[in-house]
């Protein structure tokens, strides 16, 4: 069953396709910006006025969706730029939806890029305070909905935030906006390059009081079940490559679409290894993404999305 390319094609069980892909984009305050991100080879910072052109390229490659991250001009204790009507993300959503209405826009809903202390919620007595944070996240998600977003993706790991967001959307007549929840998000060292790119590293402590312990698997199932109950339409496992068992278990257990985030550190391992001449970038990329899909992911969020799509359009 392996003797020729044709027979291998015929019996292949898992095929990564352009329909599976979501491409993350970083938008920052300013004008005319398209600057390479030092910590993430091949990725760029855009400003709201340049992002539509990039989105057009993504759409022209056949990629169905982008995932937006914002870097605001100013940060404060509670991250109030996160729900500003004219915030960077809100403007970027409008620009993209106006230029490319058919391209799905997904937004990261989390405060860490907007707070002066870099934590994903409001701080009380040195700790992230869960419940008031949920209210702010709901405001943030609602402001994205008002700007025209298709899917909001809460990535903060507060308890109850999917419910708060779902209620805020329903009450304001945004019933069609979907929620892709980062349901099983681990406190991972693989986010290092991203925190540089998003300027979102915590100023003190770490995220282990809200993101999951990498040692846990049953807890991931409990977290996913809760988010589905609260109204999540798509659930995510993050990171992806080091958590294939979690994706597999979730696939066996839940019927909703499962997304997997092949995060910045996983991406840069492949890039750095190839840049050092140690491995073939394209082959490694395809092997990693195929493995994530084989484990059970329906949606692949990856900085490789454009590279993969280019292979298909060759
Ligand atoms: C939080 C967020 C993070 C990532 C996505 N959303 C960073 C974190 O939790 O510290 C990481 C993505 C990546 O590493 O590619 N807003």
Image: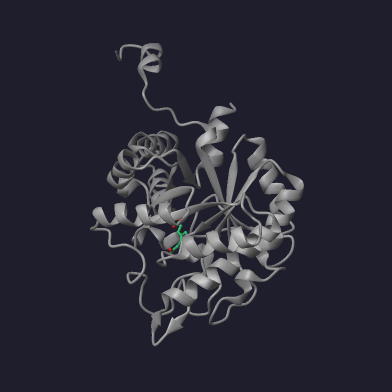
> Residue at left 60%, top 70%?
82
Closer to us: 31 or 143: 143
> Residue at left 47%, top 47%?
234
- Judge left or right: residue 166 versus residue 174: left
Residue 260: x and y in percent read 42, 46
Residue 252: x and y in percent read 30, 38
Taking the image in four quarters, ligand 1 sits in the one at bottom left
> Residue at left 56%, top 72%?
114
| Residue that sits furthest to the bottom in the current view | 125
Q: How many marks?
A: 0
Relative to 238, residue 112 above or below: below
Closer to us: 13 or 189: 13
Q: Quadrant of residue 248?
A: top left
Q: Quadrant of residue 205?
A: bottom left
Closer to us: 97 or 234: 234
> Residue at left 65%, top 64%?
143
Residue 15: x and y in percent read 43, 27
Residue 301: x and y in percent read 48, 46
Quarter holding the C terminus is top right
Relative to 18, residue 195 above or below: below
């Amino acid at each position: 069953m392996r003797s020729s390319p044709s027979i291998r094609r015929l019996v292949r069980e898992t095929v990564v396709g352009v329909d599976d892909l979501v491409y993350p984009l970083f938008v920052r305050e300013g004008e005319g910006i398209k600057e390479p991100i030092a910590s993430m080879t091949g990725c760029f910072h855009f400003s709201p006025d340049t992002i539509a052109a990039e989105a057009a390229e993504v759409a022209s490659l056949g990629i169905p969706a982008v995932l937006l991250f914002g870097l605001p001009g100013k940060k404060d204790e509670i991250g109030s730029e996160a729900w500003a009507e004219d915030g960077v993300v809100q403007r970027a959503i409008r620009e993209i939806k106006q230029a490319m209405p058919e391209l799905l826009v997904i937004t990261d809903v989390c405060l860490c890029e907007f707070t002066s202390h870099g934590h994903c919620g409001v701080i009380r007595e040195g700790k992230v305070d869960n419940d008031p944070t949920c209210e702010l996240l709901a405001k943030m998600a609602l402001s994205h909905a008002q700007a025209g977003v298709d899917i909001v993706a809460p990535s903060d790991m507060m308890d109850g935030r999917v419910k708060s967001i779902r209620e805020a959307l329903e009450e304001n007549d945004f019933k069609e906006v979907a929620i892709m929840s980062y349901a099983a998000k681990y406190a991972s060292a693989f986010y290092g390059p991203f925190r540089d790119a998003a300027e979102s590293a915590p100023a003190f402590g770490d995220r282990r009081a809200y993101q999951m312990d990498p040692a846990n698997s049953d807890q991931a199932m409990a977290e996913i079940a809760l988010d589905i109950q609260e109204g999540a339409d798509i659930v995510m496992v993050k990171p992806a490559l080091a958590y294939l068992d979690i994706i597999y278990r979730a696939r066996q257990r839940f019927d909703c679409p499962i997304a997997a985030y092949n995060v910045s550190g996983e991406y840069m391992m492949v890039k750095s290894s190839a840049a050092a001449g140690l491995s073939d970038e394209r082959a490694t990329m395809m092997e990693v993404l195929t493995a994530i899909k084989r484990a059970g992911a329906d949606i692949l969020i990856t900085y490789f999305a454009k590279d993969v799509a280019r292979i298909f359009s060759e």
